[in-house]
Amino acid sequence: MSRQADEWDIERTGLRSLSSREIKRFWDGYVAFRKPVEIAHGSLWSRWRAVSDDLVISIYLTNRSVGVFVRGQRGERYRTTVERLSAYEPGLGIALGASLRGYKGCCYLSNHPLAATDPSSWPKGYAWLAEREEHYHRTLAELPSGDA
């Protein structure tokens, strides 16, 4: 039985997957593209941009897309972040153009299809990520401090 791959599917079946070297090159290029904005290492597939002590924008790469979502600091449970951010609904979701609970495990997920295995597509991915990341950061930074 064949099933449709979703956004987070990193199965190796039938499609070439990004190598760790390619992933590093993608992120090195993105960080250089975003200077002087401070982007931190999240994982092999993601980078993080802090908004406040308790909010982080996760910027991610998959074989078929790039995207952003909001999370708490490392170790914070998804449910804790959702409970905190739900106080700003529905306004925050409208402002970000994404759903707080639209994808389990990721608050306010927004993604963009991208053939990431083709490095010639990366500049378009960088531009989309930078625009969305900046929009998320600006919107989240306007939340009352200490409450988010």
Image (spheres, rainbow, N blue to C red):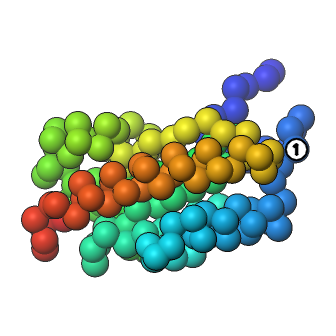
Q: Taking 118 as reference, is 127 left or right?
A: left
* Residue 117 % position (x, y): 80, 47
Q: Taking 6 as reference, is 59 left or right?
A: left
Which class describes the residues within 10 Å of circle 1: few (<14), some (14-19), or many (20+)? few
Image point 61% across, 44% down: which residue? 124
Image point 33% across, 54% down: which residue? 136
Residue 27 versus residue 124 in the image, above or below: below
Residue 79 seen in this snapshot: no
Residue 2: quadrant of the picture: top right
* Residue 31 % position (x, y): 58, 70
Q: Nearer the viewer, residue 50 or 89?
A: 50
Q: Nearer the viewer, residue 23 or 100?
A: 23
The residue labelled by disc 1 is 16
Q: Secondary structure at mark 1?
A: loop
Q: Amino acid at mark 1?
A: Arg
Image point 50% across, 73% down: which residue? 35
Q: Taking 21 as reference, is 147 left or right?
A: left
Q: Taking 21 as reference, is 64 left or right?
A: left
Image point 13% across, 73% down: which residue? 146
Residue 97: quadrant of the picture: top left
Q: Nearer the viewer, residue 34 or 137?
A: 34
Q: Quadrant of the C terminus?
A: bottom left
**How many circles with numbers are drawn on the protein?**
1
* Residue 14 % position (x, y): 89, 35
* Residue 147 % position (x, y): 12, 67
Q: Quadrant of the N terminus?
A: top right
Residue at the top extreme of this rendering: 1
Residue 68 seen in this snapshot: yes
